[in-house]
Amino acid sequence: MASPKLSVLVAIAAASTLVLTGCSAGSGGNQTGEPSGEITVLTNRTDIVDTVFQDYVIEFQKTYPDVSVKFEALTDYEGDTRIRLNSTDYGDVLLIPSTNLGKDQYAQFFEPLGDTAELSETYRFMNEASYEGTAYGLSTFGSAMGYVVNRDVWTEAGVTTPPTTEAEYLDALQAIKDVTGAIPNYTNYQDGWPLSSLLGNLGTADGPTARIDMTQDDAPWTEGNDIYKIDGLLYDTVAAGLVEADPVTSNWEESKNLLASGEVGSMILGSWAIAQMQDAAEKAGKPRDTIGFWPMPWQTDGEFTSVTASDKFLAVSRNSDNKNAANAWVTWFVDESGFAASQGAISPVISDPSPDTLSDFAELGVNYVELDADLAGEESLFQDIANESEITLGAEYRQEIIDVARGAQPGTKESFFADLNERWAAARVTLAE
Amino acid sequence: MTTVIRSPKLPARGSRRAGIFGGRMTPWLFLVVPLAFLIVLTYIPVANMFWYSVTSWDGLDPDKEFVGLGNYVEIITRPEIFQVFFVSLYYLVGAIAQLVLALFFATLLSFKTRFRNLFKGIIFFPYLINGVAIGLMFLYFFRPDGTLDAILGSLGVSDTPQWLGDSSVVNSSLAATSVWRYMGLNFVLFLGAIQSVPEEQYEAADIDGANSWHKFRFIILPSIRRILGLSFILAIAGALSAFEMPYIMTGGANGSETFVIQTVDTAFRFAKVGLASAMAVVLLAIVLIITAVQRMIFPDEKADEKAGTV
């Protein structure tokens, strides 16, 4: 007797969930004509969503008075959006999550914004958020790679110009340790993402094809390659004891103050970090100029090179009910808001001036390089190999490099890199099948 | 002597059928909401997990390619996946220490002790704190020249290891943090069980000349056998699936990776949701097997009822 009733019950439960989930679909909005209606914008900037972004909305509504903008600020932006992409409810405008999302999947989630080649005439970094010649995102701002330094510390150690070779760089760090007693280089091991951002240096010596070359290489961690330089320099720095004593308890927020106060000499980061470090210096009662930004010690023909890349890309959800208004916000935010300038970062608009934060680079005559677009049909290959090999090229394997280098885990530089090469090659074979 | 509680419903049965559903449907109506939650939030996801575990899904693609038992074969043939269970041993030792300590404090505080309510509060309090807050707190506690080193320094111990930085110490530190956090829960469970022991039994024991150890061994322990058994199963399952503390504090770095951290990484960092689901199924199977073995070795039901009525 109980079972038919139970099935009724299950049916009721199932029906009620259908009704609940069905709510998000439906409700129309205009797709063409003058932008109007409400849009939801997902953002990772929990710090300025209620201040700076609200001012943007006021400005935006001067041009588009009929559009109202609502923000959803997510603390764990990457993790949350990745899960929400499985639904249809991920806002009207969002930042493309950078982890694990292959470019061939963009069309499933985002609205095409136009032809890549055409947009490239106006905007920087168009290659990165494009698939098969179609752009799905516009850059919010760009950064150049290098390392932030506390000038006072380096001057005290007798180093006033950026080291030009790895050996000079390590000597300089040693001098900082010996003379000033400061921590020469801070890894930010615990937070992890500063370690993943080291990958941004890919292309410094190998040029724009560095990433494509890696997908064709069975042993990228070989002397001479950029990825070997990046990870090898990290290994050597740690092995020589030139980083914080206990990386496992490092702390990003604290690291800004340590650099500002001169307890830390340098950190390898993107130029986006300069403004934050200068703010910290100001708070510590020092001139903003205490913080400088130097290029990595890998020169080509006697000149420095720095790789520029975009931070996150703004995109329009394919499931948006109000694509017209969403497009208007994306274009306005990139062209008009002045967000990139306020971050001291490179503007995505080519005609905008270079930021003050990169004045060091201007003086040194640093060349900028932007990575080439991935080969047609292999847009997601790099990410796929990285995932399949479980190296991910993110923070975890660099944490392992640090652990091996400081002797906390068994292994040597050679054995570790040989293992990486082996996994990389095996993943290439698996994916070729 | 005994009062008969007359239920007004009993005689009314059959004569009072209200509404279209009738009286028999009423309890089910009350159950709709909780059952809907249970089905939607527990059974459907678990069923999905079994389905994902036989696909090579990356977590985003609309197409889930069926790969049969491929993921399970991969788990068995890759030794590094099982190696992380060694880390669980630290948590297992920690869990046992946690049970012993909780039992000790519960017994102590079930008798008349000065400030005992204060102590109860102090022991239970950590369980109420948010895990992320505990993680951050202990990161400061364990860092070089942090709180722990300062305390040890004032006691004259200066040659301390890096509590989280030293890979031979890190798992002990993390397990100790877990003990600190979860002991309160065991403590409250034990305390509740001990306080349900009738006062007369202690009095009778006193008359027979029993000391405190005898009371613990022959009255308290048999009375709380069931709750002890349950706690033990939970402790083993908890040790195998240790996740929160190490994930917040080290993210699994420096050799502190546990099986669940590895599963989460596999799903969300390596985009191998299929393989990760298979790992979760394997963990579920292991916990079920251990529980079954444990219940075979210590069958509690009948023996317990006899012991309880002595």
Image (cartoon, rainbow, N blue to C red):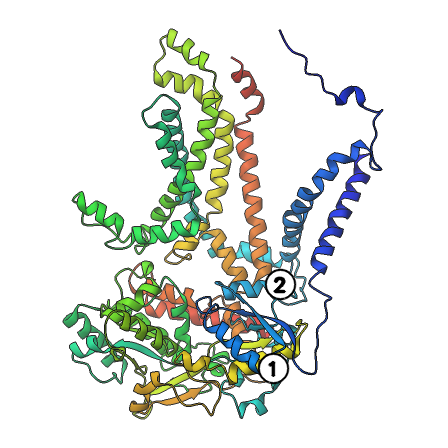
Chain under label 1? A
User: Quarter-wise, where is residue A355 in the image?
Assistant: bottom left
Picture disc at residue A67: none
Chain under label 2? B
Specify the quadrant that holds the C terminus of chain A. bottom right
Is A16 situated left or right of B105 in this image? right
Crowding at dot 2, Cα within 10 Å, few <14 / some 14-19 / many 20+, comes out as many
The extreme left residue here reads A179
Crowding at dot 1, Cα within 10 Å, few <14 / some 14-19 / many 20+, comes out as few
Where in the figure is residue A426, as x and y percent of width and height? 51, 70
Q: Which residue is mark 2?
A: B56
Where in the figure is residue B72, as x and y percent of width and height? 59, 55
Mark 2 vs mark 1, CA separation in Å:
21 Å
Specify the quadrant that holds the N terminus of chain A. top right
The answer to whether the residues at label 2 and label 1 have Cβ atoms under 8 Å apart is: no
Label 2 SS: loop
Is A293 situated left or right of A104 in this image? left
Q: Which residue is mark 1?
A: A377
**Relative vertical location of residue A104 with respect to residue A369 in this rendering, above or below:** above
The residue lying toward the viewer, choosing from B3 and B236, is B3
Q: Give the residue type that dot 2 points to.
A: Ser
**Residue at the (34%, 66%) spot, across then down:** A188
Q: Give the residue type that dot 1 points to.
A: Gly
Is residue A325 visible in the rendered structure shown here?
A: yes
Label 1 SS: loop
The residue lying toward the viewer, choosing from A33 and A250, is A33
Where in the figure is residue A91, as x and y percent of width and height? 60, 69
- Asked if marks 2 and 1 fall on the same chain, the answer is no
The residue lying toward the viewer, choosing from A152 and B101, is A152
